[in-house]
Image (tube, grey):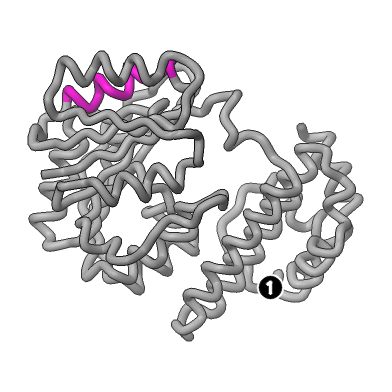
Amino acid sequence: MISVIVPIYNTEKYLKRALNSLLKQTYQDLEILLIDDGSTDSSLKICQEYAKKDHRIKVFHQENKGVSVVRNFGLSVAKGEYISFLDSDDYMEPNMLQTLYQNLIDTESDISVCHYQKFKDQISHIQVKKIVKVLEPLQALEDIISDGLLTNFLWNKLFKKSVFCSFAFPVNKIYEDVYIMPKLLEQAKKICYTNLILYYYYQREDSYVNYYSKEKNDNYLEVCHEVCRQLLKYEILNDKLKAYRIFYIYSAFLQLAKSNLYHVMFDKNMNQEYIYFRKNIKYLQRNFSLKRKLLIYALYMHRILFYQIVKIMK
């Protein structure tokens, strides 16, 4: 059985689409855990209505405590041998869980991954020839710090529940999936990936993901440092970890500039990050677009120049 954990908070506009995509799954042996995190709209009511229609749906309600608490609770009550996650404003292809499950069984993997597509208004359905790739844990770790195929997202994956072991999502932290993903990959014997687009990630304008602040910036860099600390034991990854941190620093400066947080770009924390960025930029060897290369070079030259160029490009 697959237990699907669905954290829900004020997503009444999109929730039915998400739930309908679960009920249409060709893999039928499901436990659907709808966990309402203190919604103030009609989300809880919608969940209760769906639970009346399908015995596989279980509804839980709690005071607003954040997505990490929701996911930890979901893991504690899940009865399935396998775990999947669905964000309540996204949706799945009908064959997503069946495909991930079959790939996992066929390759004797512990984590199965599919490709995904971001969307705002319309979906562009892309036909591709199915490819299944199998990675060892170290290869998978190298992949996620190199911005490769696997990504740190939870929702495009199927996990054997056993890989979570005693791990818990960090409470009151942002980017909790980035924090926990290396731990999960280390626990897996094998990880399989398919290029099929089976998950659709809705980019909401009002999403917290699109809001940036000094607190979020500090959390963003903190999780980067934590991942680096976790993986320093793998000497073969050292250069790639430096590149990983460099790109995180660039991304942090980019978000600060886009959000008009000019003063944060020069605070004590960001001064230290900037020194590291300039000292180790040689490790950042990726195939970037011309625009991104220009921005990285501008940041290397001067933060004020970088800020001005970002504002012009915005």
Question: Residue 185 or 134: which is nearer the viewer?
Answer: 185
Range drawn in magenta: 12-24
Q: Quadrant of the N terminus?
A: top left
Q: Main secondary structure of the magenta part?
A: helix
Residue at point 48%, 60% (across, down): 179
Relative to 99, is 47 on the left or the right? right
Q: Is residue 183 magenta?
A: no
Q: Is residue 136 above or below residue 107?
A: below
Residue 20 shows up from this direction: yes
Q: Which residue is mark 1?
A: 282
Residue at point 41%, 48% (across, down): 153
Q: Is residue 5 above or below residue 105?
A: above
Q: Is residue 16 magenta?
A: yes
Residue 285 shows up from this direction: no
Query: In the rendering, at what x and y percent does residue 119 appear?
Result: 46, 26
Relative to 226, is 143 on the left or the right? left
Q: Quadrant of the C terminus?
A: top right
Residue at point 49%, 64% (across, down): 145
Question: Residue 133 or 101: which is nearer the viewer?
Answer: 101
Q: Amino acid at mark 1?
A: Lys
Picture quadrant where residue 242 is located: bottom right
